[in-house]
Image (spheres, grey):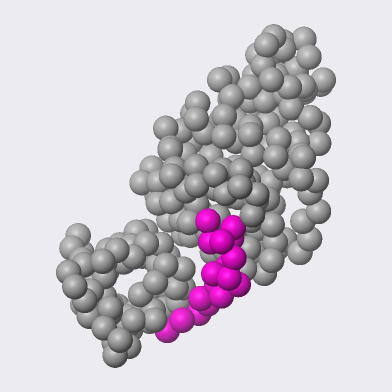
Amino acid sequence: MILQVEGIILKARDYKDTSKILDVYVKEKGIIGILSKGCKSMKSPLRSVSEPLIYGMFTIYYKEDKLSILNAVDINQSFKNIKKNIESISYSNFFSELVLQVIKQSDEKEEIYAILIDSLKKVDEGFSPKVISNIIQLKMLNFLGVFPNLEECVFCGTTQDIVTIDSNNHGFVCKGCHTNQKLISKKAMQLIRMFNYVDIGKISKLDINEEVNEEISKFLDDYYEKNTGIYLDAKRYIKKLTLIDI
Ligand SMILES: [Zn+2]
């Protein structure tokens, strides 16, 4: 069956000498494997469109539960600016890896797809990939079914004097119930709440203090470790990059 589908290539791996297998996130179907036959040959029209982050309309010979076959891609956007910079490339790899994990645990294919595309567009437009990565990670917690309670203290139910978010108990903790949980600044907690509601596609300005962003990033590392079972190589790679200070 020949289909035209909207999607984005998240991964491309070599297949035999001349071809590649692409992991494509198709908006309505989730991740599907597509064989790009002969695309490694210099003359192949598929050569330039069989790379990660190619986003557009894919014409494929679709086979359910088997590898589909690529016919052509009409590119919508190729995220040229992301590809110019090693930091933004690393972050977009991280977004791809994260989404590949989350989609295994959720049926919300179109919602997750929209968040991914909006995030990549914003990084391509020049918004801080670090901030966007915090927003996408926070939003993904909804699809993983472990979003923290950011409405009231998880121990006593009060909405007053909230001092931190407890990763082990999934939510706000008030001053009276606080024991040894690491404190989080008010500003970071406000942003964490805001990140969940913000529509990434509509962001026109992101003026976020680096220190506060780092605090949110550390909270998310801890929260992911304790609650999701997701472990991503790309995240470790970004940490290494940060250490050598690019
Ligand atoms: Zn309490």
Residue drawn at the location 74% of the way across and 27% of the way down: 184
Above or below, comparing residue 162 to residue 45 in the picture = above
Span highlighted in magenta in the image: 74-90
Residue drawn at the location 42% of the way across and 84% of the way down: 74
Residue at the extreme bottom of the image, as rendered: 43
Residue nearer the viewer, 119 or 145 = 119
Left or right, 47 with respect to 89, comes to left
Indicate the quadrant containing the N terminus: top left, top right, bottom left or bottom right.
bottom left
Residue drawn at the location 36% of the way across and 46% of the way down: 104
Above or below, comparing residue 71 to residue 244 in the picture = below
Where residue 238 appears, as percent x and y from the top left, is 55, 48
Residue drawn at the location 63% of the way across and 32% of the way down: 219
Above or below, comparing residue 6 to residue 166 in the picture = below
Above or below, comparing residue 133 to residue 32 in the picture = above
82 within the magenta span: yes
- Image quarter for residue 20? bottom left
Left or right, 42 with respect to 170, comes to left
- Image quarter for residue 139? top right
Indicate the quadrant containing the C terminus: top left, top right, bottom left or bottom right.
bottom right
Residue at the extreme front of the image, as rendered: 244
Residue nearer the viewer, 56 or 159 = 56
Looking at the rendered structure, the number of numbered marks drawn on it comes to 0
Residue nearer the viewer, 56 or 239 = 239
Where residue 207 appears, as percent x and y from the top left, is 81, 53
11 within the magenta span: no
Where residue 23 appears, as percent x and y from the top left, is 33, 62
Where residue 233 appears, as percent x and y from the top left, is 43, 44
Left or right, 189 with respect to 135, comes to right
Q: Is residue 210 visible?
A: yes
Q: Is residue 121 visible?
A: no
